[in-house]
Image (cartoon, helix red, strand yellow):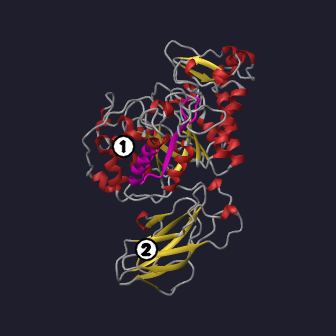
């Protein structure tokens, strides 16, 4: 994740009214991941500066989520480990300096930011993915400012050479070290055990981005233990592979529903480097060759559940065309979900590619995504760019692409059993509303208990298209104990049909409830007798 770019606030919001925008309005999906990366390193997105009080931090985070919710976004990817530190209360990882201004210093008064953020997201029916940068140990070379808990300070000097290396202006955890892999695996394990996260997310930083004139000093490690690899490049990739496999195994042993995903650099390999599997691009950096991240292997081996490549170029950009790369990634998912990373930070802020001065660039990208059946959503880097609204991007998403709310796409291969079907059990009405309540009766085990519910409403006395998001009128908060929906948009004298379904932790939908047919009367609501048998759907 190129998380060090400054953002420019553009004061004029331009709303799109092009023919393309009109076409897009007809393609609102019922299920689609819509997320944003919230970067904490260098206080890029949140908190706005170190040293804010916990109350100020909470207010800022709530404000971000409220804007995203108003945009019908449904997921956040929050950087909880930016540089060997933590945005959560850990006995083994020091508090981040981007919270208090000094690494190792807890918020005062004490609170747990990640615990708060998860609840804030879930209360708004948004998934929370804990974004970790596993290998970046520091953000600069000032080791004296590190907490005594940081391994670069805590370890004996004779162990530091195995655990860390210096490259450029930072220190990194050494991917070749089995002890480092175990340490990083334990960091993930601690999060999954103690926090109700929906996903664990790694970005594009594996081995560091190359610095001109500087070599990685790991040749002695390779010589000592080449593990039958003939080249140091394959050996480096295997070092990363081992961490990814270990983390995947750990997550699934503890909470199989927690998704493990990667946001890699947008080009895996250029075609001139790999004529068979490479993309038709001329990128100066490649994930496989330069960062030693063999993402396709991780997908093939079921080590990750989704991939979110950072396709941070415009449509038609010759060295790395967005359209070409979306098509390439869509052909290499190996049955896993694909979300596209969009460069919101480049909107009206890129002197190399004039396409980013087009108000409709992101809209066109989302349209391309939706035309591809193997793309399940979008993630924007970063949230500050959406809040700043350059070229009216926030407005156009609200009025065009994200006009309706969307469910999360389900991951069938992670679901061992469908959730139990709910039953609508009570109908009430007031002068202006209709209220329905439901319950779940036939739950055989905990895995069948729905995690949240969706209410569909159809005009008249019939069931319509569940895939039309206009009929999706309510999504309940996660683990909500109040199974009630009050419809405030009904019209007196009209007939309506309501159906409820449940969803599990990996967003697989139950069979639906039997429909109920209701006439809105002047003083309340009148339930009609059922005119056909139970209607179920997967």
Q: Residue at x 56, y 31 (%)?
A: 105
Q: Residue at x 49, y 29 (%)?
A: 101
Q: Nearer the viewer, residue 249 or 235?
A: 249
- Residue 62 locus on image (x, y percent): 44, 48
Q: Residue at x 44, y 58 (%)?
A: 29
Q: Nearer the viewer, residue 75 or 209?
A: 75
Residue of label 1: 387
Look at the image and say whether residue 75 sits in the magenta stretch. yes
Q: Which mark is residue 458?
A: 2
**Figure quadrant of the C terminus:** bottom right
- Residue 505 locus on image (x, y percent): 60, 56
Q: Secondary structure at mark 1?
A: helix
- Residue 350 locus on image (x, y percent): 33, 30
Depicted 53 relative to depicted 26: above or below? above
Depicted 136 relative to depicted 495: above or below? above
Which range of residues does the magenta coloring cover? 58-86
Extreme residue toward the top, this view: 213
Residue 332 seen in render? no
Is 468 left, or right, of 168 in this rendering?
Answer: left
**Separation of residues labelled 1 and 2 (CA atoms):** 34 Å
Q: Quadrant of residue 421?
A: bottom right
Look at the image and say whether residue 15 sits in the magenta stretch. no
Q: Residues within 10 Å of mark 2 (few under 14, many from 20)?
A: many
Depicted 367 relative to depicted 146: above or below? below
Depicted 154 relative to depicted 390: above or below? above
| Of pointers 1 and 2, the one earlier in the residue sequence | 1
- Residue 451 locus on image (x, y percent): 59, 60
């Amino acid at each position: 994740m190129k998380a060090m770019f400054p953002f420019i606030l553009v004061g004029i919001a331009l709303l799109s009214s092009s023919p393309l925008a009109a076409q897009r309005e007809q393609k609102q999906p019922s299920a689609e991941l819509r997320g944003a990366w919230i970067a904490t390193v260098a206080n890029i997105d949140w908190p706005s500066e170190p040293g804010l009080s916990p109350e100020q931090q909470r207010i800022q985070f709530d404000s971000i989520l409220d804007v995203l919710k108003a945009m019908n976004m449904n997921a956040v990817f929050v950087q909880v480990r930016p540089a060997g530190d933590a945005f959560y209360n850990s006995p083994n990882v020091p508090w981040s300096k981007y919270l208090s201004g000094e690494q190792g210093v807890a918020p005062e008064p004490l609170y747990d930011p990640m615990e708060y953020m998860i609840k804030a997201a879930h209360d708004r029916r948004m998934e929370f993915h804990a974004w970790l940068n596993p290998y970046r140990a520091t953000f600069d070379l000032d080791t004296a400012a590190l907490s005594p808990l940081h391994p670069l300070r805590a370890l004996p000097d004779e162990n530091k050479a195995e655990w860390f290396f210096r490259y450029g202006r930072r220190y990194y955890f050494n991917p070749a070290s089995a002890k480092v892999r175990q340490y990083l695996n334990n960091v993930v394990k601690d999060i999954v055990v103690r926090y109700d996260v929906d996903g664990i997310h790694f970005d594009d930083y594996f081995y560091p981005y190359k610095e001109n004139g500087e070599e990685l000093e790991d040749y002695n490690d390779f010589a000592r233990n080449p593990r039958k690899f003939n080249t140091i490049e394959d050996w480096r990739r295997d070092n990363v592979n081992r961490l990814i496999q270990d983390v995947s195994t750990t997550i699934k042993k503890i909470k199989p529903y927690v998704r493990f995903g990667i946001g890699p650099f947008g080009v895996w390999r250029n075609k001139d480097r790999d004529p068979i599997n490479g993309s038709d691009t001329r990128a100066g950096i490649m994930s496989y060759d330069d960062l030693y991240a063999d993402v396709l292997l991780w997908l093939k081996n079921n080590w990750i559940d989704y991939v979110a490549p950072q396709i941070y170029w415009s449509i038609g950009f010759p060295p790395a065309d967005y359209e070409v790369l979306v098509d390439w990634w869509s052909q290499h998912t190996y049955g896993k979900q694909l979300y596209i990373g969009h460069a919101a930070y480049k909107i009206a802020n890129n002197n190399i590619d004039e396409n980013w001065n087009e108000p409709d660039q992101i809209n066109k990208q989302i349209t391309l995504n939706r035309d591809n059946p193997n793309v399940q959503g979008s993630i924007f880097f970063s949230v500050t760019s959406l809040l700043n609204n350059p070229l009216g991007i926030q407005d156009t998403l609200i009025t065009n692409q994200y006009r309706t709310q969307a469910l999360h796409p389900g991951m069938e291969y992670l679901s061992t059993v469908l959730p139990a079907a709910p039953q609508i059990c009570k109908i009430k009405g007031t002068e202006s509303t209709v209220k329905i309540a439901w319950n779940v009766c036939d739950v055989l085990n905990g895995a069948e208990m729905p995690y949240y519910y969706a209410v569909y409403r159809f005009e008249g006395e019939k069931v319509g298209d569940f895939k039309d998001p206009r009929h999706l009128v309510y999504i309940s908060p996660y683990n909500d104990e109040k199974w009630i929906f009050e419809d405030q948009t009904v019209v007196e004298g009209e007939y309506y049909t309501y159906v409820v379904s449940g969803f599990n932790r990996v967003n697989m939908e139950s069979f639906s409830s039997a429909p109920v047919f209701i006439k809105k009367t002047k003083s309340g609501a009148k339930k009609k007798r059922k005119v056909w048998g139970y209607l179920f759907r997967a």
